[in-house]
């Protein structure tokens, strides 16, 4: 493993860690989502500082060169991340559908109830329509 | 003094009536709101049938999302204090008064209803986890001791209502306590007794607990140093 690759790995790890920690302080990412990136940076750091681990794994797995192993590890971690993200996006889409459906439904039921009460009030007191129209005006002003 | 009792409920159809009826009958001086966190069982129907004061979230957003909604509700209606009480009947409202007294007495911002203020922790796997978090908080806050870090019975004052309602990182979990202690927020504990849940299941299984511990330790030991400290 060349010294250039090791320095590059170390730099990438440090930048990743610094970036995600900055995002935490700017309230752009939840802390539990940052754990992955800290672990990711940690693994890159370990591989860069102790290349012996890399050599050992290269011989065990039968990979051509340590650099290939580094790529393998990074690809593995990223694929795992894409996989979990894809699942989370699906769940979010589903939640969004439920959320908009529920919002529309509850709005609809609230409006329906409002109309019903207005109608019953009109039937009960035909002379007091003023109150109802006044209230409608108030509500329109509020909305 | 306006106090709101916040009852987060996720699939608590079997417990919620007992908890809320007890509140209505024996503690009518306190207002309450149930936050139904997108339950998949009959929680919503039970609440509607009994005409409880219910904030009904359409989808499940988790405990921290439910607490956030509740804190915003409290802020919207101008409450001065919020007491978080679990919907499963573990917490006894008779301790609320002593928690309020403690807050008045010591002028602190958060009072925790603690099982281990004066009593010792039993040695179970759950309590070992709790003790690890207590140690982590003790180490990172220059020796501040919180006995029962995971207690869900907490009293917050107005400043904390605003923080918990409007900031991304404020989950109602031990890591937030560690962070707040470092911000100079005062946290006190009051000894309470909690009951075992009567019906339903706890969400804590091995996988969830392990992930929870990992999140908390990362957050307390690493991330809290990078959060902006809003000093009191």
Image (cartoon, rainbow, N blue to C red):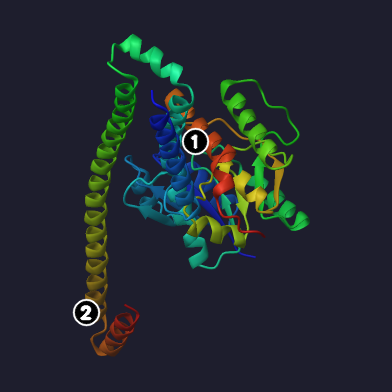
Image location (x, y in percent) of residue B199: 46, 31
Q: In front: A92, or A101?
A: A92
**View extreme (right): residue:** B105
Query: Is disc 2 placed on a helix, strand or loop?
Result: helix
| Observer-nearest of B86 and A119 | B86
Q: Residues within 10 Å of mark 2 (few under 14, many from 20)?
A: few
Residue A82 in the figure: left or right of residue B139:
left
Q: Residue at x 36, y 51 (%)?
A: B49
Residue occupied by mark 2: A123
**Dot 1: element:** helix
Q: Position of residue B9 (x, y in %)?
A: 44, 44
Disc nearest the viewer among 1 and 2: 1
Residue B29 appears anywhere in the view: no
Residue at x 26% of width, y 84% of height: A125
Q: Vertical placement of A9 versus A27: above or below?
A: above
Quadrant the C terminus of chain B occupies: bottom right
Q: Could you tell whether B101 is left or right of B127 in the image?
A: right
Horizontal side of A112 relative to B16 (left or right) equals left
Label 1, on which residue?
B215
| Residue in view at x 29 percent, y 39 percent | A85
Instruction: Tell me the quarter of the image containing the N terminus of chain B.
Output: bottom right
Residue B157 is drawn in which quadrant?
A: bottom right
The chain that hosts pointer 1 is B
Labels 1, 2: one chain: no
Residue A44 visible? The answer is: yes
């Amino acid at each position: 493993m060349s010294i250039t690759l090791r320095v590059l790995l170390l730099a990438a790890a440090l930048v990743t860690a610094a970036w995600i920690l900055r995002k935490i302080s700017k309230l752009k990412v939840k802390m539990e989502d940052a754990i992955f990136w800290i672990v990711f940076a940690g693994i890159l750091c370990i591989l860069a500082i102790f290349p012996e681990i890399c050599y050992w794994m290269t011989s065990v797995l039968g990979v051509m060169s340590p650099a290939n192993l580094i790529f393998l590890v990074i690809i593995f971690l990223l694929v795992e991340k894409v996989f979990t993200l894809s699942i989370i996006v699906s769940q979010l889409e589903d939640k969004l559908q439920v959320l908009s459906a529920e919002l529309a439904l509850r709005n609809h039921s609230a409006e329906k109830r409002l109309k019903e009460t207005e109608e019953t009030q009109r039937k009960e007191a035909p002379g007091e329509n003023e109150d109802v129209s006044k209230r409608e005006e108030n509500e329109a002003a509020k909305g | 003094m306006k106090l709101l009792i916040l009852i987060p409920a996720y699939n608590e159809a079997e417990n919620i009536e007992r908890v809320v009826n007890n509140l209505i009958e024996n503690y009518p001086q306190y207002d309450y709101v149930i936050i139904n966190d997108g339950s998949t069982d009959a929680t919503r129907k039970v609440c509607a049938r009994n005409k409880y004061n219910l904030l009904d979230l359409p989808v499940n957003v988790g405990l921290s999302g439910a607490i956030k909604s509740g804190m915003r509700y409290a802020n919207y209606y101008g409450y001065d204090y919020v007491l978080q009480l679990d919907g499963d009947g573990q917490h006894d409202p008779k301790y609320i008064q002593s928690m309020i007294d403690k807050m008045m007495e010591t002028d602190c911002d958060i009072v925790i209803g603690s099982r281990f203020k004066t009593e010792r922790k039993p040695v179970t796997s759950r309590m070992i986890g709790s003790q690890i978090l207590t140690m982590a908080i003790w180490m990172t806050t220059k020796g501040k001791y919180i006995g029962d870090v995971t207690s869900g019975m907490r009293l917050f004052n107005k400043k904390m209502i605003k923080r918990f309602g409007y900031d991304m990182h404020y989950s109602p979990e031990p890591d937030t306590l560690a962070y707040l202690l470092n911000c100079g927020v005062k946290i006190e504990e009051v000894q309470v007794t909690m009951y075992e849940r009567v019906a339903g299941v706890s969400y804590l299984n091995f996988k969830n607990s392990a992930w929870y511990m990992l999140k908390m330790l990362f957050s307390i030991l690493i991330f809290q140093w990078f959060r902006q400290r809003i000093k009191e």
